[in-house]
Image (cartoon, coloured by chain):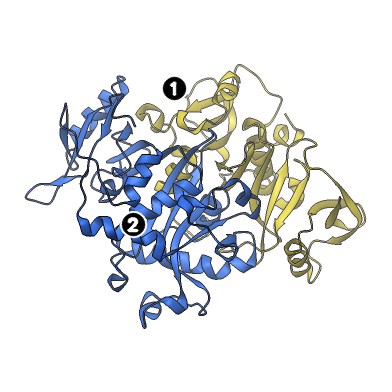
Chain colours: A yellow, B blue
Amino acid sequence: MSAIIEDATGGAANGDLYRFVVIASPESGAPAATIGARGDTLLLDPMRAPDADLIGPFQPPIDGPEEIAIPRWAVYDCAEMPGAIIGVLREPIESPCDQPLDPVGLVLATPHAEPGDWHLYGLTVRRPGGPVDEVRASVVGAALMLLGARRVTLTVPWTSPLLGLLTRVGRVEVLAARTLLHGPGAVATVAVWGTDQCNGEPAEAAVPVGEAGLVEQAEAMLERGRRLVLVVRSDRGLCVAEVRA
Amino acid sequence: MSGSAGERGASRGLLERLEPFVLAPRWRFAGLDLEPFGRGIGADARFDILSRSAAGIVDRLVRLDRLTFGATGMPMPEWLFVDASALPGAIVGLGLRARDMPPGTLERLGYSCGPDELAPLSMYIAVPAQREGVWYGHNLASLNREAPELSLRGLGGVTKALGLRVMRCREQLGATQWSSAAISVHTRFGPMELLTAWTPAHANPATLTYRLRITEQGSRDVLAGLRRPTPTDGVFLVNSHDRQGLLDLEHRLERGERLAVVGPPEHDETGTALVPVGPISPARSG
């Protein structure tokens, strides 16, 4: 387990206790065999009533600003049935029968049509007790691990500290500089790659995130078919660099 | 096979008269069927959801969703058109170039587009499951009622058949309410095997989850406006408003019984949908 997940959940994995919850139907083909074999992960089936009673805490908000609210039917139709909901528990527990399930964070996951790729959204943090973006990054890392994903994609505002934290989870590639129907402000679509699976090295020249005109410049490069990644440079912080073929 | 002569003619003509389009990330196009039923999807009708060039069609698809579902209170939040639709999956539909629309229709629909741009008249949205060939459909919208001057009868079924073919889908999962008129469309493809009959995890527990086997013959029957006769062996009617009845049916499924919705709903004198359900048989499983 990566250090960022250990930091957020407080300690090393213990196979006797549940640390993660995955909600996925048997129809989804989510790696149930792998997840089920993990002693630290509780697998719940949204199609069955007894499990449905337990999944309440793992729902993103249905009310509130349009950019975060997700209707209940969309959670079932777009995540629970074809994909999964990944939850990280605040404290490890022995059994859901003895203690209520209390996630510190959760995320919805839908598979891409390409095997091994997943899209994450509805990233929700509950009562973090610490830096919210650290928890968000740890949930993304947990999803990457539990799904056995080649890469996960998600949308992140350029101004969010989460962008930089994701570079600690894996190589981060920028797929879109401005994502349609997302806002306010420019929101990037990025891919976080599993270990060593994003080919190519970043160029030495890099533009700091936040520099005026970066979003437009990145958008123009991506439209021309260039590949861009996020890198952390000691002298300039989080930057965007082109990937050399 | 049934289907009025008018219905058959109307459905068959839609794929010829309207233009298909697809919205997905650019890297997905190579894996899709871009010649569905011999009807090619032109390069200018393939839209990359991650490109700004797709902004116009995306706005019009949001408008299409509002026109279709706004009155039911179930429109989809805009950003889900990306995150839970076109980015992991695909949006496939049929439309007309603005210049080919009847005068006044574009304005009445609230579409803003140049003469060469595509005005969508229907869409089918699905996301993949991890198993190859399995997709989960969650949105089927058509302007059949909103644009009667365009004679779009049968467009829902044709659009779904088109979408599933583009996605190379062999098994389609989905959920719908027992009272939904959409069951009439879905059963055109074949029996809807029940995975749940009462679904507490859904917004409306009176929801069924189903599996459809997608076959070449089934899809072509839909395009032709044909419908298989509803079987009668072992078939019983499920009252869409009977909570206990739906719970009992769910318990039968959980005990391992295999059942399917086998035809379009009937309606009683109060207008309540009565849905025909029967046992799955090898012949019926498609």
Label disc, if present, on residue B12 of the rendered structure: 2
| Mark 1 element type | loop
Label disc, if present, on residue A97 of the rendered structure: 1
Q: Is residue B67 something one can see in this rendering?
A: yes
Three-letter amino acid code at the position of disc 2:
Arg
| Mark 2 element type | helix
| Residue B165 falls left or right of residue B275 | right
Q: Which of these two is toward me, B47 or A120? A: B47
Three-letter amino acid code at the position of disc 1:
Cys
The residue lying at 39 percent from left, 32 percent from top is: A47
Residue density around tag 2, few if under 14, some if 14–19, many if 20 or more, within 10 Å: many
**Residue B54 vertical placement versus A122 (above, below):** below
Image coordinates for residue B36, horizontal then vertical, percent: 48, 51
Residue density around tag 1, few if under 14, some if 14–19, many if 20 or more, within 10 Å: few
The reply to the same-chain question for discs 2 and 1 is no
The nearer-to-camera label among 2 and 1 is 2
| Residue A118 falls left or right of residue A25 | right
